[in-house]
Image: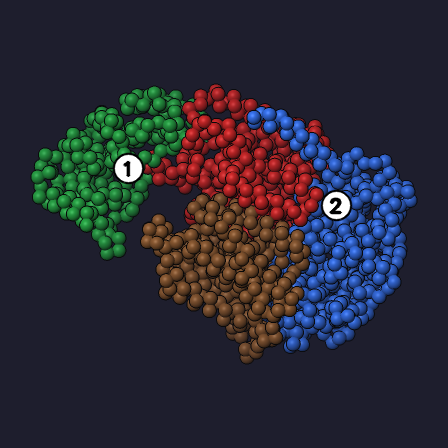
Chain colours: A brown, B blue, C red, D green
């Protein structure tokens, strides 16, 4: 029982870390219909910036997160204008290829400037401490990740369902020409949501670094995981992404406990079964 | 227009391509080429850089010419374990670049793919790293200057029991060296009076270890033996060990030195403090020859933090190759070259070493080390005990 | 797609194409006699990329999991060879059969979905197989790779040795045969229907044709070709690593295909040769920049040459004819 | 004589919205029937229901006495219920000949042969030439579809349908988008359709409907409001109201 509880806590933390990173991708894929395989690359850039700020400049964790989000968005916005804008209405194949290309470039450049070593992001004392849950110790950082995940989910839901920006965004997604006719500047909406998605990626890259360590191949190593999680959840659905992350996180963590020698076997088996059963994802939007 | 373009550029392009492909085929008369295969890009690029740094450090100290023959190093990149590409690269080095010696090789599968070529190519292979015992049996033309897992692991058994830790969980990556490590540790700990209660093998690419930590907790072990190849996995493992409170609960972690490679230590920091590892080389090893090696190596690699054990394998590898060249007077004769270094002993930056004439693997001192800070506040592997003249027990059994 | 080309004219063009491939292949043999190991690898990968073109280019199904078929062939041939079946031709057939079976399975799963979920299924399948091959290390060698195979001489005469001449010529012969068969198959009624399904599935179903069995057949054919490529690699290098059934190999194959241009077989060959030659040269000069370069090339292709190199050349050549098959989609 | 095609009580609702309700009609061999109705009357849904694209909420469809309600779209085609498309769905890079050959091969069960030459089937090629000739497409038979006139593309749609040798043919606005100069050729083609074939034409162009159909049904707001002779349809008050009402709506 205690073991089950303990695994559940680990699964929850891992799932939430995945969620924070992936939700931005879910938004770009579901709302803007771009298969952005470079999403992980942006999470990685965030991680590098945070590591540089917090470790090399000694600015602290919180400041590192803020800098990472701002810095990554600043890098991403020109890319959106120059590259992404041209593939919004292209085929999935084109989108996949271009974003793989961007990922390769980011990896190559990162490798060139920062070297191939792992980068850590030093945690503040409060988060590094082990918190006693009664049945086991858990790193304070994991609790922070779980809380952040809940805040991100709630905040996004509110933003999209309850604010003017959300209404404009949904209008632009449903029918761009009509939205433009109504005076909504769709390109600004798109750029803003892209920036939001990238900012979340950077945030996820930083807070998730304890699970998915930051190194140049991060972008490629977890590319598949992120894509898979989003598809299982159903692109564009916040509850779907949350459900997928928690489900797949739980399967992954449990399998690693019970049958560690099988690696990701059961993770991908679950993915195949879920996608076959729900081709549009757990809570995908009907087309 | 198109035609003119093609006419003008196609021959030029073909020439360039031909030139690039046959680069170096027109070698000068008295240059001996040594092909070095290693991960110079990709996730393991740091290890490849260490190969390069070690080799260049040796050349910088000893000059580029041996007994009147110039040495030219030809590097070939093999980013990850990829036996197919390894074979293709080795084949090319032998056939096209006409190398007389092969060196390097980080991963076991790559070494296994290369060894069948050696006899036909009349080329010895000096392995700088790949650490599975069985490689040595696959060809008589292989010499190894690195270590094997059974070699580095065996002393841990006695050391653990001496510290009162007897009940172990063993965790290794599921590949050749991991299996070697698991076997050697089991044997060593049982010989010393302890036991391995549970042996877990995990895939190479694992980075999230909380569930494994839970397994350790549930097994009620006093100690953990762990082997993972250096890189992202080791970092996650050591962190998880500390984060989940196992370290605080008094569970002791013992591991071969791969887990605390010097280049990872800054990142591991406090989480690794006090960790006991056993290994053949620590950058902080106290000796005059090591100081000179480290100085040359750090210069070659560019940053002091990055130097670690693969460099010393390469450094000694070049030494062995230089002896081979001297013994064969620059002629290509793989058998004679290998024969000449059997039993060869010398003082390496890691301490006294010798090529075991039977296994062609290096016999060396294995050190017990503890992760601690040095006088400058840098994290180092501090040597606390040494076991001299360790052979590869994985082969002699 | 030849518009109203008479049978004999297409046949002539095909023979010319085959002769050209043979010529280039033999030219490679004479020009780079020291690079045959590399060139053999190019042929093996070319078979993989060709097989991917059948699915992507002819059926319009995006796949990032073609390595599953390639790896199935490689491991099947490798395991058979280790267990004493050493005839190279037989090994190729074993690889082909394994690839075909895997193609059947993969198609049956992938065809359940469309679009992005389909792509994800392809990735999940190759990853699943990767993990399975890793786990079944007693059969596959796991992370250490499968080694210890020694294929018998081809036709009992030509040995697979260090210089790799027999391996290369064997591979070249295999490529020519496969290419000829594929040219024929893609122009068969079946091939036409596949292209039709890519263009407009609704129209094809209004003709009374089920998509599923047609596409599944193509998956089997694709698997056969990819399996042969894998088997060739296993024979030539005498080792099989986990990398042969990986996402990386699949993604690279897709990149090469798109670089060369999808949907007319020649593109697959052109893309493979250019990509691998570039990789070979650039990576040897500075491996760190290789990824950056590939990335930049990919971006440039999507932006400026969406139909790949061969497609762009086509475009130049046929500047005056408008409205090509699939253009503008 | 039992009807070759019969729809009874066919209904479809999306959520609470009824787009087709309780539609019944029957056609005999050789009959020429037109279905008309204002925009949004549910004609597209009706075509989709009949061809098996979407399942009905209630009702049944019979073809030559067989209940095909539960059959999928492909099976219905194979039973002889063939349609043309309102917007041409042709392959721009293929020739008319290739389109028709492909269709004939399918009818002969040879369309998905792997080890056969597409252009090597002389029986199919000969028959295709014949069909194309009857529709006056011989001249363009070997040009890419993308390069032939739109009117010719519409004729090709009909040629493809004929090559399937249907029992019942659904013509979905065969003259839509065709310049008026070309409509006579379409009409000619329609007039030369096999006499035994039952043809259901869905069409906006009233002139065409009056010249082609012996009988007209009118669909409005998802219901059949009229069945009868073409001459009577304009006088029917319900029809007038449906059309004028909908125009009034559209104008608001």
Position of residue A190 measured from the top left corner of the image (x, y, whole percent) = 43, 54
Task: Report how far apart the C-alphas of labels 2 and 1 lie in the structure.
Answer: 65 Å
Q: Is residue B389 visible?
A: no
Q: Residue at x 64, y 41 (%)?
A: C279
Disc 2 crowd rating (10 Å Cα; few below 14, some 14-19, many 20+) is many
* Chain letter of the residue beneath label 1 in the structure image: D
Front-most of D197 and B275?
B275
Identify the secondary structure beneath mark 2: strand
Q: Which residue is mark 1?
A: D86
Front-most of D56 and B99?
B99
* Chain letter of the residue beneath label 2 in the structure image: B
- Above or below — where is D142 with respect to A189? above
Residue B75 disc label: 2
Position of residue B320 measured from the top left corner of the image (x, y, whole percent) = 85, 50
- Above or below — where is C311 with respect to B183? above
Q: Residue at x 50, y 61 (%)?
A: A200
Q: Residue at x 40, y 37 (%)?
A: C199
- Above or below — where is C275 with respect to A35? above
């Amino acid at each position: 029982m205690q073991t089950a509880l303990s695994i559940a806590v680990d699964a929850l933390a891992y799932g939430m870390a995945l969620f924070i990173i992936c939700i931005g991708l879910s938004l770009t894929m579901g709302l803007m219909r771009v298969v952005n395989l470079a999403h992980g690359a942006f999470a990685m850039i965030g991680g590098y910036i945070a590591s540089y700020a917090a470790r090399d400049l000694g600015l602290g964790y919180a400041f590192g997160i803020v800098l990472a989000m701002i810095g990554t968005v600043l890098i991403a916005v020109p890319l959106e204008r120059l590259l992404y804008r041209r593939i919004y209405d292209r085929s999935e194949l084109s989108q996949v290829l271009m974003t793989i290309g961007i990922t390769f470039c980011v990896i190559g450049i990162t490798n060139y400037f920062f070297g191939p070593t792992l980068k850590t992001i030093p945690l503040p004392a409060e988060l590094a401490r082990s918190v006693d849950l009664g049945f086991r110790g858990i790193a304070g950082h994991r609790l922070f990740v779980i809380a952040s995940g809940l805040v991100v989910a709630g905040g996004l839901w509110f933003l999209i369902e309850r604010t003017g920006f959300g209404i404009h965004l949904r209008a632009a997604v449903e029918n761009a020409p009509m939205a433009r006719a109504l005076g909504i500047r769709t390109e600004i909406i798109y750029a803003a949501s892209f920036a939001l998605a990238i900012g979340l990626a950077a945030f996820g890259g930083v807070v998730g670094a304890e699970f998915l360590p930051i190194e140049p191949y991060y972008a490629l190593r977890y590319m598949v995981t992120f894509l898979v999680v989003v598809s299982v959840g159903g692109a564009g659905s916040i509850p779907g992404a949350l459900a997928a992350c928690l489900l797949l996180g739980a399967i992954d963590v449990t399998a690693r406990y019970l049958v560690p020698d099988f690696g990701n076997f059961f993770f991908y088996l679950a993915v195949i079964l879920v996608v076959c059963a729900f081709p549009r994802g757990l809570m995908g939007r009907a087309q | 227009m198109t035609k003119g373009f093609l006419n003008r550029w196609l021959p030029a392009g073909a020439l360039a391509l031909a030139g690039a492909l046959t680069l170096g085929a027109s070698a000068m008369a008295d240059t001996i080429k040594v092909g070095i295969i290693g991960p110079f890009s990709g996730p393991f690029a740091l290890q490849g850089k260490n190969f390069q740094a070690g080799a260049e450090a040796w050349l910088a100290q000893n000059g580029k010419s041996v007994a009147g023959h110039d040495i030219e190093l030809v590097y070939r990149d093999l980013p990850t374990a990829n036996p197919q590409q390894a074979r293709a690269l080795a084949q090319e080095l032998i056939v096209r670049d006409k190398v007389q010696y092969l060196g390097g090789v980080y991963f076991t599968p790559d070494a296994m793919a290369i060894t069948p070529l050696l006899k036909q190519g009349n080329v010895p292979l000096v392995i700088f790293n790949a650490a599975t015992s069985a490689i040595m049996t696959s060809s008589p033309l292989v010499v190894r200057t690195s270590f094997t897992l059974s070699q580095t692991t065996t002393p841990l058994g006695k050391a653990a029991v001496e510290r009162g830790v007897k009940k172990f969980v063993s965790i290794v990556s599921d590949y050749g060296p991991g299996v070697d490590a698991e076997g050697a540790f089991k044997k060593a700990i049982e010989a010393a009076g302890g036991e391995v209660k549970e042996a877990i093998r995990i895939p190479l690419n694992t980075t999230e270890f909380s569930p494994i930590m839970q397994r350790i907790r549930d097994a009620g072990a006093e100690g953990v033996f762990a082997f993972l190849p250096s890189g992202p996995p080791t970092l996650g493992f050591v962190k998880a060990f500390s984060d989940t409170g196992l370290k605080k609960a008094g569970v002791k972690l013992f591991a071969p030195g791969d887990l605390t490679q010097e280049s990872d230590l800054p990142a591991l920091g406090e989480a690794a403090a006090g960790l006991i590892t056993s290994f053949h080389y620590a950058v902080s090893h106290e000796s005059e020859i090591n100081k000179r090696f480290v100085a040359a190596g750090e210069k070659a690699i560019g940053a002091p933090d990055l130097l670690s054990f693969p460099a010393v394998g390469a450094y000694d590898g070049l030494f062995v190759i230089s002896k081979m060249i001297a013994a064969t007077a620059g002629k290509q004769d793989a058998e004679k070259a290998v024969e000449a270094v059997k039993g060869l002993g010398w003082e390496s930056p890691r301490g006294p070493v010798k090529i075991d004439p039977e296994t062609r693997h290096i016999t060396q001192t294995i050190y017990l080390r503890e992760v601690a800070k040095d006088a400058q506040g840098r994290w180092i592997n501090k040597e606390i005990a040494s076991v001299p003249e360790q052979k590869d027990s994985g082969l002699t059994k | 797609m030849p518009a109203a080309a008479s049978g004999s004219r297409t046949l002539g063009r095909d023979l010319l194409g085959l002769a050209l491939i043979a010529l280039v292949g033999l030219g490679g043999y004479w020009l780079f006699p020291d690079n045959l190991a590399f060139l053999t690898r190019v042929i093996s990968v070319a078979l993989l990329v060709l097989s991917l073109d059948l699915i992507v280019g002819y059926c319009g199904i995006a796949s990032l999991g073609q390595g599953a078929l390639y790896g199935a062939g490689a491991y099947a041939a490798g395991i058979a060879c280790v267990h004493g079946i050493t005839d190279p031709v037989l090994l190729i057939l074993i690889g082909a059969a394994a690839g075909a079976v895997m193609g059947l399975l993969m198609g049956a799963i992938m065809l359940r979905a469309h679009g992005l979920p389909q792509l994800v299924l392809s990735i999940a399948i190759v990853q699943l197989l990767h993990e399975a091959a890793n786990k079944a290390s007693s059969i596959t060698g796991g992370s250490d790779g499968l080694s210890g195979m020694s294929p018998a001489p081809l036709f009992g005469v030509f040995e697979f040795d260090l210089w790799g001449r027999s391996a290369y010529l064997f591979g070249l012969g295999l490529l020519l045969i496969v290419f000829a068969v594929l040219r024929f198959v893609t122009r068969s009624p079946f091939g036409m229907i596949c292209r039709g399904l890519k263009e407009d599935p609704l129209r094809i179903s209004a003709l009374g044709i089920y998509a599923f069995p047609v596409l599944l057949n193509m998956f089997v054919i694709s698997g056969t070709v990819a399996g042969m490529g894998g088997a060739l690699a296993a024979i030539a290098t005498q080792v099989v690593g986990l990398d042969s059934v990986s996402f990386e190999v699949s993604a690279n194959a897709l990149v090469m295909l798109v670089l060369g241009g999808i949907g007319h077989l020649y593109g697959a060959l052109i893309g493979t040769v250019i990509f691998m030659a570039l990789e070979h040269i650039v990576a040897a000069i500075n491996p760190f920049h290789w990824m950056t370069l590939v990335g930049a090339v990919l971006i440039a292709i999507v932006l400026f040459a969406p139909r790949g190199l061969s497609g762009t050349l086509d475009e130049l050549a046929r500047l005056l004819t408008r409205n090509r098959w699939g253009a503008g989609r | 004589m039992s009807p070759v095609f019969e729809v009874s009580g066919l209904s479809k609702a999306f959520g609470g919205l009824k787009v087709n309700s309780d539609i019944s009609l029957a056609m005999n061999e050789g009959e020429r029937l037109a279905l008309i109705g204002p925009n949004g009357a549910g004609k597209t849904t009706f075509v989709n229901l009949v061809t098996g694209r979407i399942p009905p909420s209630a009702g049944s469809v019979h073809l030559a006495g067989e209940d095909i309600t539960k059959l999928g779209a492909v099976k219905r085609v194979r039973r002889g219920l063939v349609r043309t498309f309102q917007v041409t769905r042709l392959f721009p890079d293929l020739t008319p000949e290739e389109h028709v050959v492909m269709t004939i091969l399918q009818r002969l069960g040879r369309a998905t042969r792997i080890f056969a030459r597409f252009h090597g089937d002389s029986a199919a090629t000969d028959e295709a030439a014949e069909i194309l000739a009857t529709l006056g497409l011989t001249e363009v038979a070997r040009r890419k579809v993308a390069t032939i006139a739109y009117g010719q593309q519409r004729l090709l749609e009909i040629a493809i349908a004929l090559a399937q040798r249907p029992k019942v043919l659904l013509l979905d606005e065969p003259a839509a988008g065709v310049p008026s100069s070309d409509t006579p050729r379409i009409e000619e083609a329609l007039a030369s359709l096999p006499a035994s074939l039952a043809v259901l034409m869905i069409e906006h162009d009233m002139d065409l409907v009056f010249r082609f159909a012996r009988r007209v049904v009118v669909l409005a707001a998802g219901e059949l409001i009229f069945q009868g002779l073409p001459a009577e349809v304009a006088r029917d008050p319900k029809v007038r109201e449906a059309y004028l009402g909908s125009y009034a709506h559209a104008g608001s």
